[in-house]
Image: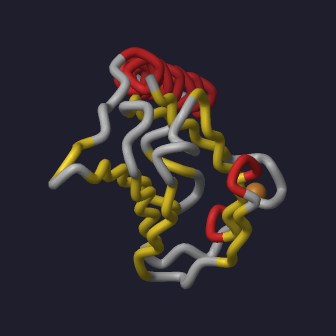
Amino acid sequence: MHMNKQMLISIVISGLLIGTAFWFVSVRPNAENVGGTVPTAVIIDGKQIIDISAKGGYSPRMVAAKAGVPTILRVSTNGTFDCSASLVIPKLSYQKFLQPTGTEDVLISAEQARGALQGLCSMGMYNFQVVFK
Ligand SMILES: [Cu+2]
């Protein structure tokens, strides 16, 4: 069968569309997972540790934690050159420009470990939330 240019183009375009559809379907369950299963902070020797990684945003976006427990919010950067390195936690009056690669411990007292605590980049476009219950 002779294939003309137009046919070839339409085959390439439909291939791209199918590829995009597959990509969308395979990515979606992950996106739903972020809202669905909320990771829980671990308590080691009476101290609660919450690990957040900062690079192109914050991950996980939401963490469940126990209220009234002294907590360490451990924020890790790894080649983070975007604005998620510029961390602001309004409730703690915390603001710091993190090292591009490293770990920063933010201490949250038992009294401060209540309700919802939000962290954001200084521009406010990335955020994460710790919910103390
Ligand atoms: Cu930002």
Q: Residue at x 40, y 15 (%)?
A: 36
Tell me which corner region of the image, top left, top right, bottom left or bottom right, holds residue 2: top left
Q: Residue at x 76, y 51 (%)?
A: 90
Q: Residue at x 41, y 75 (%)?
A: 103
- Residue 41 x/y as whole percent: 31, 40
- Residue 113 x/y as whole percent: 51, 40
Left or right of 70 on screen, residue 86: right
Quadrant in which the C terminus is drawn: top left
Residue at the extreme right of the image, as rendered: 123
Work out whether residue 94 can be spotted.
yes
Quadrant in which the N terminus is drawn: top left
In the rendered view, tell whether residue 11 sits above or below residue 49: above
Q: Residue at x 61, y 39 (%)?
A: 117
Q: Nearer the viewer, residue 53 or 93?
A: 93
Q: Quadrant of ligand 1?
A: bottom right
Left or right of 116 on screen, residue 2: left
Work out whether residue 3 can be spotted.
no
